[in-house]
Image (cartoon, helix red, strand yellow):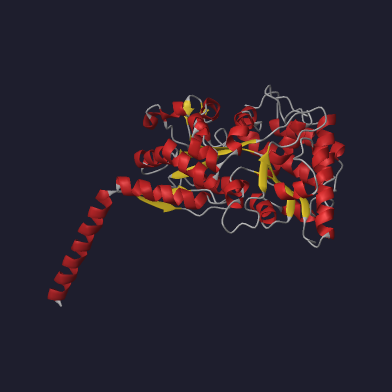
Amino acid sequence: MKSMTLKLTAAAALVSVVAFGAQAAGVTVTIACGTVGQDFDFCKKAGDEWSAKTGNTVKHLTIPQSTSDILGLFRQMFAAKSTDLDVLNVDVVWPGIIKDQLLDLTPYTHGAEKEHFPAIVANNTVGGKLLAMPWFTDAGVLYYRKDLLAKYNEKAPTTWDELTATAKKVMDGERKAGNGDMQGFVFQAKAYEGLTCDAIEWVSSYGGGSIVDASGKVTVNNPQAVKALTTAAGWIGTIAPTGVLNYGEEDARGVFQKGNSVFMRNWPYAWSLSQGADSPVKGKVGVVALPRGDNGKTAAALGGWQLAVNKHSMHPKESADLVMYLTSAAVQKDRAIRGSYNPTIPVLYKDAEVLKANPFFGDLYDTFVGAVPRPATVTGVKYNEVSAAFWNATHDVLSGTAKADESLKKLEAKIESIRRGPKWQ
């Protein structure tokens, strides 16, 4: 028995040495990548490349699909000072909300942030600290069926009224021809952050401003905003299915990519998927700027994601190194070509390979760099409350439970109560 004990002890010691050797060779960095479209697959591929270069291991944490749910999960982890997550994806509106939980990346970038769009770097800099590196930027765009518009002798719409009329004409014609599932327009109308993006586009395109202006004044309750939401409500049950009230990005893409919608509002990532070998609409899709309202101008909500490091991480140096690799020009170019993810590095918009894969990147460059931001900077840590109030008020209008003027009046009072004083900060 003693001999067996000695053998087991020796074996345990050997396992311990091997384990120690593996640990010494590298650490494990846990990252939360996106879940929409091909985001996770691309993140895993690049993470594996970084692992091969550094000897470290990348572990992936599964997260929800909804941005609101993702933020809720991260906040729970921060409250517990969890070390289970090292690198996290950060929505463009989050730096001011979770600023106290993120590592300052400045000591690790070696000036690489200067290669990215200055506005996004500024967005990610809070109190002089660079809290996240730009990963990809986004702006809402309009997808349309080129073949169907040509069939009905129509052009891509430049106003919401034109979109409404064209969507109805083509939808009715296709249904009469035998496709009873054809819809005119699909978009994000579920009560979540995606609806805030869509509704800001509608309101801004009608000249209704933003929810809260740069000075901190609540401006959403105005006649043009009322007109914008009233117009959008008129789509439900006519050119858009009532089910759109529960649609996120992937729900809308699913309908459009199956060939069952004339128009779709979505982010650029949907382009490469629509052109996939198994896509029923491959070669039949066009992309243009979103329409404008009466006497307004086209408006695209600023989106995009950043990568940041949890300040509670046990491996800050390695985590920051992973962030720098994933946000590098080489990785962004690959994601742009294979996944239609908009780079945050200006020179990539002149890259021939990127433009060949995404012809609309060049045409819509001004749309991407001039996108309309959500009022996250001015409202700071209270942005999430403001956005939730806005998307719920908008959803009430779309679902028919409230009129636009009544809903926006109540929303104004709600946001004033969230501010709780003359200043936001």
Task: Name the residue nearer the viewer: 121 or 423.
Answer: 121
x and y, in percent, of residue 379 in the image? 65, 30
Residue 202 locus on image (x, y percent): 76, 36
Q: Is residue 389 above or below residue 43?
A: above
The residue under the point 51% across, 39% down is 354
Q: Residue 367: where, in percent of width, then height? A: 64, 31
Q: Name the residue rendered at 84%, 54% in the picture.
A: 172
Instruction: Please indicate, yes or no, whether residue 71 appears anywhere in the rendered image.
Output: yes
> Residue 119: x percent and y percent?
55, 26
Is residue 241 positioned above or below 352 on the image? below
251 relative to 325, above or below: below
Query: Please, which residue is most extreme toward the bottom here?
Result: 1
Left or right: where 179 falls relative to 108: right
Please identify the quadrant where the C terminus is shown: top right
Residue 394, quarter of picture: top right
Q: Indicate the quadrant where residue 204 lies.
A: top right
Residue 29 appears in the picture as rendered: no
Left or right: 351 in relation to 170: left
- Frontmost residue, 176 versus 62: 176
Q: Residue at x 57, y 41 (%)?
A: 358
Quadrant position of the N terminus in the picture: bottom left
Q: Nearer the viewer, residue 212 or 286?
A: 286
